[in-house]
Image: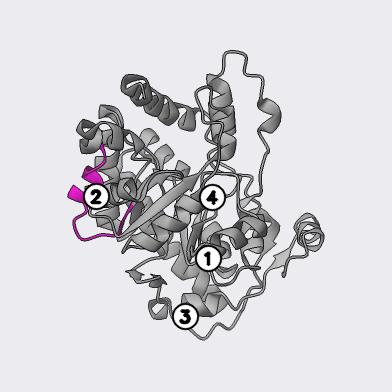
Amino acid sequence: MDLTRHAHRKDEHLSLAEKFYQPVAASQFDQLRFIHQSLPEIAVRDVDLTTQLGPLRLPVPFLIEAMTGGSPRTGLVNAQLGRIAAATGMAVASGSQSIALQDASTAKTFTPLRENNPDGIVLANIGAGHTVAQAQTAVDMLAANALEIHVNTAQELVMPEGDREFHWLDSIGQTVAALDVPVIVKEVGFGMAQETLAKLAAVGVQYVDLGGRGGTNFVQIENFRRPNKELSYLDGWGQTTVESLFEARQVPQLQVIATGGVRQPLDAAKALALGATVVGSAGQILHSLIKTDEATTTARLLDWQEGLRDIMTLLGTRNLAALQTQRLLLSPALESYCRQRCLQY
């Protein structure tokens, strides 16, 4: 691995993620509707936002999703994210630590997530195909409470220097069996199908991050880095976050994190109602950090928590279990998708 080039790519990803940021996401949350309840018989103070991801108790069902690390610039971002996580009570995931497994000197660009958030929930992150020993090193680096293993076939194929072999399932199963912390298999923005989810469950996976289409688009980012930019026809590849949530309903033994194009508390409420345990956001948080500052971003995420409480109050739901009993109305397009895929809705 050319470590200097790798660090440059991480900085480039950060810039391109902001370049292609869209304030209105195509994750299909706008194709779902709640039914308003005029007599909820509840007070906002009665709403409980705590959630349980395996053995991990989270005070709020929000995750600052994996973004970056591996260069001085991205280390500063991770320091901000660690402080924001501590101030908001949100869990926070590291960007891919693969570079730190090759060059230990870059670990200091990831560790601020824990140093600035000593009592919070921190998720380590490596790519699929790493060894059990490397997975444990990534966890130890951050004193992490869980590990994300990201799967990113579409990104790798478009990335000019990307991998071309994808035999990951056995190593994922070995890592799940060996580690003492929860192992979450994470898609990076192309969603997950029930067939994929069933394969993961069969090797012992209990937790997935659906990473649906509609948020940060790594096909768009990696294609921009190609000299001829010739793979734009793959821009719409994959399942949206909402489609992935319906896919995941077919494999109910898995606990689900929903990420991809979450732009507001109403998106989060819909994801939770469809069965997610936690809802993550990356692009929206990065955009806020770049366009405003750390204090403003922290305040906005605290506002998200109040917004979710307000929505749950409107529905008369005191906790997340009650929220998940809500039936949502689907657009014709989304209903058609579910019918064609034989998905429960």
Q: Amino acid at mark 2?
A: Leu
How many residues crowd mark 4 within 10 Å: few (<14), some (14–19), many (20+)? Answer: many
Residue position marked by numbered label 2 in the rendering? 142
| Quadrant assignment for the C terminus | bottom right
Q: Amino acid at mark 3?
A: Arg
Q: Amino acid at mark 4?
A: Gly
How many residues crowd mark 1 within 10 Å: few (<14), some (14–19), many (20+)? Answer: many
Give the side of residue 4 with respect to residue 286, left or right. left
Whole-Å distance between the Cαs marked 2 and 4? 22 Å
- Nearest to the eye among marks 2 and 4: give it: 2
Badges 1 and 3: C-beta atoms under 8 Å apart?
no
**First in sequence: mark 2 vs mark 4:** 2
Residue position marked by numbered label 4 in the rendering? 211
Q: Which is nearer the eye, 164 or 234?
A: 164
- Nearest to the eye among marks 3 and 2: give it: 2
Residue position marked by numbered label 3 in the rendering? 318
Whole-Å distance between the Cαs marked 3 and 2? 34 Å
Mark 4 residue element? loop
- Nearest to the eye among marks 2 and 1: give it: 2
Q: Which residues are magenta?
A: 109-123
Numbered label attached to residue 276: 1
Please provide percent x and percent y for residue 256: 51, 63
**First in sequence: mark 4 vs mark 3:** 4
Whole-Å distance between the Cαs marked 4 and 3? 27 Å
Give the side of residue 57 with respect to residue 279, left or right. left
| Quadrant assignment for the N terminus | top left
Mark 3 residue element? loop
- Nearest to the eye among marks 4 and 3: give it: 4
Residue 111 shown in magenta: yes
Please provide percent x and percent y for residue 163: 52, 31
